[in-house]
Amino acid sequence: MIDTYYRIKSLNDLGIHIHLHCFEYGRTHSEELEAICETIKYYPRKSGFLSCFSIKPYIVSSRKSNELLKNLIINDFPILFDGIHTTYWIKHPSLSDRKKFVRVHNIEHKYYDNLAKHESDLSKKFFFKVESLRLKWYEKVLGGINCLFSISNSDQKYFNEKYHNSKLITPFHPFIKPECMPGFGEYLLYHGDLSVNENAIIVISLIDNVFSKVPFKCIIAGKNPTNQLLIKVSGHSNIDIVANPDNKEMTQLICNAQINILPALEMNGYKIKLLFALFAGRHCIVNSKMKSGHDLGSLCHVTDSDVETIRHIHQLMGEEFSEKMIEERRKLLPENYSNQINSEKLIELIFNSPSPSL
């Protein structure tokens, strides 16, 4: 995950030694991570059928590892659990005297409920709904630890009202300052993981109701587009798909677009692709659900109807992205989304928090 990698990198840059424990299921070991961590230990994820029958959520129970617990016990370092899915051992008696923190990437039970709402496959819909209920019950493990690190304003409000131990730490990302280019781009761009059902629904709607209605070149870029999407795009001469671009190619697509258009179906967590669009792209059109949870509305064009979106597109395709617009981003983005400032906050909160035994 982008937030995880750049958080580790930023902490390492400030002299913090990271002992990383991570679960693997098919991916190769990361040389990039090994270069910025003191040690890395890998554990297999138990993603088989039996993990579905645990009272704990599947995303938690499939990450049970006795070896992980043994390795956590052998020192007294603070523990940062990266996401609620990594917290299987968080209440274990052997860790009762340890400083414990959780990075919460979103409100997981709401996220899974939204997955169920937008899923057409009945077996997947059932799984997502059950997982949502289990996560809602399980979420209480987040109480009584040193601190939660929320990723967005809306998540911060939710967790702090419920557990009274949350601090806002905005997403970590690859940018030091905005890298937007002035002038004009040649196309509209939507980017995201196209294998995610929510994104697929958004893309189909954009094709039917926006992209097919404008005379401009439109690009859809992302991971694993479905055959249905590829067939649908083939019927429109002004729409192209870029499948599985690497990080460099995706950044170039964002930089060279005239408009990054990024609506969302639900308000949950933080859509880090919006930060990419604002740090590297030109004009950005979002809807209210994408805007919710952060303070970047002044840098975006917000619209909640197809008619208004098309009107904004016609206007912005003829509007130069100016040095003044770039300067506004240079002022607002590093102030609120600085990896170094966020790392310094983490260091202060983690190392100056009292131990449970004190």
Image: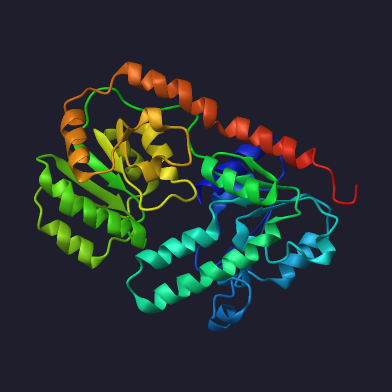
In the image as oriented, which residue stretches furthest toward the right? 358
Q: Is residue 44 above or below residue 20?
A: below
* Residue drawn at 38 percent across, 65 percent down: 117
Colour convention of the picture = rainbow
Q: How many marks?
A: 0
In the image: residue 55, left or right of residue 220: right
* Residue drawn at 77 percent across, 49 percent down: 78
In the image as oriented, which residue stretches furthest toward the top? 324
Corner quadrant of residue 57? bottom right
In the image as oriented, which residue stretches furthest toward the front? 161
Who is closer to the viewer here, 60 or 257?
A: 60
Residue 278, x across and y down, in percent? 38, 33
Residue 316, x across and y down, in percent? 21, 29
Who is closer to the viewer here, 278 or 313?
A: 313
Residue 179 in sight from this viewpoint: no
Residue 3, x across and y down, in percent? 53, 46
Q: Is residue 58 above or below residue 146?
A: below
Residue 160, x across and y down, in percent? 64, 46
Q: Is residue 230 above or below residue 158?
A: below
* Residue drawn at 84 percent across, 64 percent down: 94
In the image: residue 103, left or right of residue 16: left
Corner quadrant of residue 309? top left
In the image: residue 159, left or right of residue 328: right
Residue 352 in sight from this viewpoint: yes
* Residue drawn at 58 percent across, 44 percent down: 157
